[in-house]
Amino acid sequence: QVQLVESGGGLVQAGGSLRLSCAASGRFFTINTMGWYRQAPGKQRELVAGITSDGRTNYADAIKGRFTISRDNAKNAVYLQMSSLKAEDTAVYFCKAVVSESRWSSDDYWGQGTQVTVSS
């Protein structure tokens, strides 16, 4: 069983910064793509940023230039540095990892979510 544990959410003023962290634990063969999603009240969950195991990244247009995703493969961790935060960034942020528990199969795992609230 794989677990993802997130940390780093909180309340911040508009224009401020936060750094989210997510670490995977458990038994697995390898972690493939990792990413951050968010879900605001009344809205669907959306991709914020993703990163492959070799470091290639992609970002949602709404956060390009303000957020940076990174990962530490040795720690099985992914991070999201958020800067110039806006009120519309307020949401629950979820970590997701595509984990291979063997050479022949992989599954999606999600963290429990961490609340980010940006006050204007």
Image (cartoon, grey):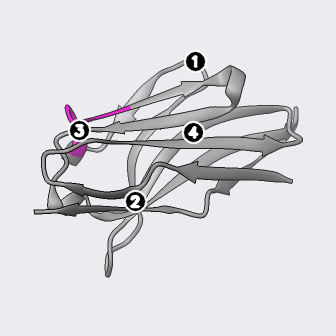
Which tag, 2 or 1, sits closer to the chain's start?
Answer: 2
Determine the CA span between mark 2 and mark 3.
16 Å
| Mark 4: amino acid | Met
Residue 45, quarter of picture: bottom left
**Which residue position holds label 3?**
83
**Which residue position holds label 2?**
38
Answer whether labels 3 and 1 touch (C-beta < 8 Å). no
| Mark 2: amino acid | Arg
Say whether residue 66 is magenta. yes
Q: Residue at x 38, y 33 (%)?
A: 58
Which tag, 3 or 4, sits closer to the chain's start?
Answer: 4
Magenta-drawn segment:
63-68
Which tag, 3 or 1, sits closer to the chain's start?
Answer: 1
Nearer to us: label 3 or label 1: 3
Q: Residue at x 60, y 64 (%)?
A: 112
- Image height of 64 relative to 2, above or below: above
Nearer to us: label 2 or label 1: 2
Answer whether labels 2 and 3 touch (C-beta < 8 Å). no
Q: Residue at x 33, y 70 (%)?
A: 40
Determine whether, in the image, residue 108 is placed left or right of residue 70: right
Determine the CA span between mark 3 and mark 1.
24 Å
Say whether residue 60 is magenta. no
Q: Residue at x 63, y 45 (%)?
A: 97
Nearer to us: label 3 or label 4: 3
Residue 83 percent location from the top left of the image: 23, 38
Residue 118, quarter of picture: bottom left
**Which residue position holds label 1?**
54
Secondary structure beneath label 3: loop
- Image height of 18 relative to 90, above or below: above
Q: In which quadrant is the C terminus drawn?
A: bottom left
